[in-house]
Image (tube, grey):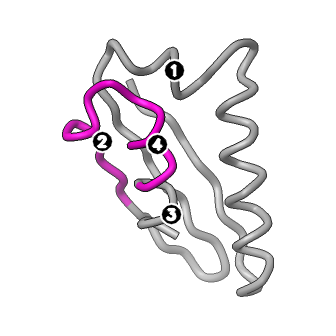
């Protein structure tokens, strides 16, 4: 999952070397914290949050295959 998020976000941003994804595991849930450079936050969120919503949808679909809940937090 972490690699999937990193791959998708690096394709969107201007500074892919500054993309960092941290995973916090719980029992049946995982929280992924995404950190990008300040210039790229708008590109990751997108207009009215559409890009972030799409990334979360893909993450949700993949995590349902492995029967886990996954959440994505974008950290400034």
Whether 38 is drawn above or below 21: the answer is: above
Q: Secondary structure at mark 4?
A: helix
Give the residue drawn at x 52%, y 70%. 1
Q: Mark 3 or mark 4: name the one nearer the start of the chain.
A: 3
Q: Position of residue 47 (x, y in %)?
A: 70, 13
For the point 54% across and 59% down, which residue is it?
31
Q: Within 10 Å of the Cα at label 2, are there few (<14), some (14-19), or many (20+) other Cα atoms?
A: some
Identify the residue at image location x=51%, y=49%: 8
Is residue 23 rendered to the left or right of residue 14? right
C-alpha distance separating marks 4 and 2: 7 Å
Q: Residue furthest bottom?
A: 66
Give coordinates of residue 26: x percent, y percent: 54, 75
Query: Which mark is first along the chain, 2 or 4?
Result: 4
Residue linked to disc 4: 9
Residue 73 in magenta stretch:
no
Mark 3, residue position: 4
Label pair 4/2, CB-CB below 8 angstroms: yes
Residue on which disc 1 sits: 43
Q: Do the numbered discs 2 and 3 sit on residues whose CB atoms are within 8 Å?
A: no
Tell me the crowding category of disc 4: few under 14, some 14 to 19, or many 20 or more residues within 10 angstroms, Cα based.
Answer: many
Front position in the image: 41 or 22: 41
Question: Cα distance, mark 1 to mark 2?
Answer: 12 Å
State the extent of the magenta-drawn residues as a range: 7-22
Q: Residue at x 29, y 47 (%)?
A: 20
First along the sequence among labels 4 and 1: 4
Which numbered disc covers residue 19? 2
User: How far is disc 3 from disc 4 in space, using C-alphas?
Assistant: 9 Å
Name which of mark 2 and mark 3 comes first in the sequence. Answer: 3
């Amino acid at each position: 999952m972490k690699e999937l998020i990193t791959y998708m976000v690096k394709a969107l941003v201007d500074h892919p070397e500054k993309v960092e994804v941290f995973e916090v595991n719980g029992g049946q849930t995982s929280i992924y914290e995404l950190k990008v450079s300040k210039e790229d936050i708008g590109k990751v969120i997108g207009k009215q949050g559409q890009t972030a919503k799409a990334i979360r949808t893909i993450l949700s679909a993949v995590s349902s295959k492995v029967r886990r809940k996954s959440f994505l937090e974008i950290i400034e």
